[in-house]
Image (tube, grey):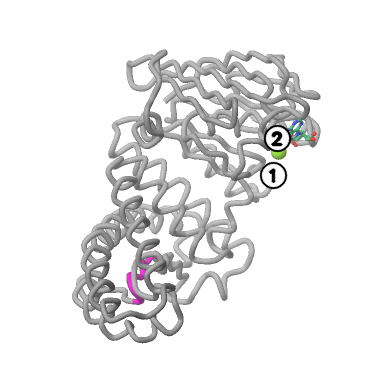
Amino acid sequence: MEIANLHLQNFRNYKDEKVLFSPGINVLQGQNGQGKTNILEAIYYLLTGKSYRVRKEKELILWGEDAFHIFGDFLALDRKLSLESHYLDKRKIVKINNVPCRKLSDYVGTINVVFFSPDDLIMVKGGPAERRRFLDFHIAQLYSRHVHILNAYNKVLHQKAALLKSPFEPSKISNIEIWNEQLMDLGSKVILNRWKFTQVLAQKSKEIYDQLSSGEEELSLNYLALGHQNVEEALHEFPIMLKEKMKQEIERQVVLVGPHRDDLNFQLNGKSARVFASQGQQRSIVLSLKLAELEVIFLEKGEYPLLLLDDVLSELDIFRREYLLEFIKPIRQALITMTSAEKPLTEVAALYRVDKGHIGRII
Ligand SMILES: Nc1ncnc2c1ncn2[C@@H]1O[C@H](COP(=O)(O)OP(=O)(O)O)[C@@H](O)[C@H]1O
Ligand SMILES: [Mg+2]
C-alpha cells in the first residue's frame, strides 16, 4: 500500500495544500504544533473514516470554515484508487474512484493502514474498552463482515438495555429471553472473531517481543471471553451465565453478560503487564503489537499496509529504534514524523519540512 499524493482543503491547520509522496521512507520534519500529526490524521481519516484523536468531525475543520475536503491517490497491490472524504453540512461523503460509497463499512478495509503513536501506550495502560476497540478495528480491516456483526450485536444490546430499564410487566422475562437468544447468537460470533484474531496476533507479537527482549521475557496475549481464557468454555457458559445473571441485570438495569465487557490480557512472564510492566516494557509490548499487525495484514492481504509512525522514534531506545527501522525495510512505504531537533535517518526516500500549515519537500 502506498499513498501517491494528498490534497487537503480546510482540514485542521491546512487551508489548501497539496503534497506528493515517494515509495520508501518519507520523513515529515518540523517544530511542534506545525501540522505533522495533522497530515497523518488526514490520511488515516481518508482510509478509515475515523480520526483516532477526536470523535466529532467538526473539530477537524479549519477554524472559521464550515467544511473540509481530503483527496488522495493510492496504489494497492497493482490497483490505483482515488479516495475522497468530505465533511459538509454536518454530513460525511466518501467516494472511491469518484463513486459515492453508501456505507462506511463498505469502504473500511479497502486500504490497510497501521498507525503508531506514543498514545498507543493506552492499549496496555488503559481500560478494556480501548483494547476491544483495537481488536474490532483490526478485525474489520481484514474481514469487513465483522462490522456488520458488531453493529447487529450493539443494536440488540441497546434493545435489551432499554427493556431492562422499562417498568416491570409480566411479559418482561420472556422478552428478555428473546433478546438473550439474539445476544448469544451474535455475541458468540463476535467472541470467535476476536479470539481467532488474537491467536494470530499473539503468535507474531510473542516472536517479536522475544527478539526485543533478547529472549529474556515472554509476552502472551489472551482474549478473555466472558471472563474465560478458554473460548470453548466461554461459549458453553454463555447461556448459563445469561440465565444466572438475569435477576441481577433486572435489578441493576444493565446488561452484564456479553462480549461488550470482554478484555484482551497482556502478560509478561505470566504477570499482568498493565499492573507490573515498566514504562519501557509497556512500550515494547506496543511496538511488538504494531509490528505483529503489519505481519498479520501482510499474510492476509499479500501486501504490507501503509505505515504511519507519529513521533515514535524519539520514544524508543537505540536498540528498539534500529530494530523497528530494520523491520520496516520490506514495507512499500512509511510516513514518519519527527521534530527538527532529532537525529536524521539514513536511507530516507523523501524529506519534507512542515511549517505552519504548509508542507514542502526538501530532499
Ligand atoms: N481545527 C483546526 N483549525 C485550525 N488549526 C488547528 C485545528 N486543529 C488543530 N489546529 C492546529 O494544528 C496545530 C497542531 O498540529 P499537529 O499536526 O498536531 O502538530 P505537530 O506538528 O506537532 O504534529 C496546532 O497549531 C493547532 O492549533
Ligand atoms: Mg504531532
Q: Earlier in the sequence, mark 1 or mark 2?
A: 1
Residue 265 location (% of width, % of height): 43, 68
Q: Quadrant of residue 339?
A: top right
Residue 291 location (% of width, % of height): 45, 45
Amino acid tagged 2: Met
Q: Quadrant of residue 230?
A: bottom left
Image quarter hosting the N terminus: top left
Element at badge 2? Answer: strand
Q: Nearer the viewer, residue 281 or 72?
A: 72
Element at badge 1? Answer: helix
Residue 331 position (above or below residue 192)? above
Q: Are marks 1 and 2 in contact (CB under 8 Å)?
A: yes
Q: Nearer the viewer, residue 12 or 75?
A: 12
Image quarter hosting the C terminus: top right
Amino acid tagged 1: Ser
Q: Quadrant of residue 171?
A: bottom left
Residue under pointer 2: 338
Q: Nearer the viewer, residue 217 or 300?
A: 300
Residue 81 location (% of width, % of height): 40, 17
Residue 167 location (% of width, % of height): 41, 77
Is the residue marked by circle 1 packed among few (<14), some (14-19), or many (20+) residues within 10 Å? some
Q: Does residue 331 appear to the left or right of 199 in the view shown?
A: right
Residues rendered magenta in the picture: 221-227
Q: Residue at x 35, y 55 (%)?
A: 155
Residue 300 position (above or below residue 5)? below
Q: Is residue 307 found inside the magenta-colored segment of the image?
A: no
Q: Residue at x 53, y 44 (%)?
A: 323
Residue under pointer 1: 314
Is the residue marked by circle 2 packed among few (<14), some (14-19), or many (20+) residues within 10 Å? many
Q: Within 8 Å of ligand 2, the CB of disc 1?
A: no
Q: Residue at x 69, y 44 (%)?
A: 314
Q: Does residue 151 appear to the left or right of 35 in the view shown?
A: left
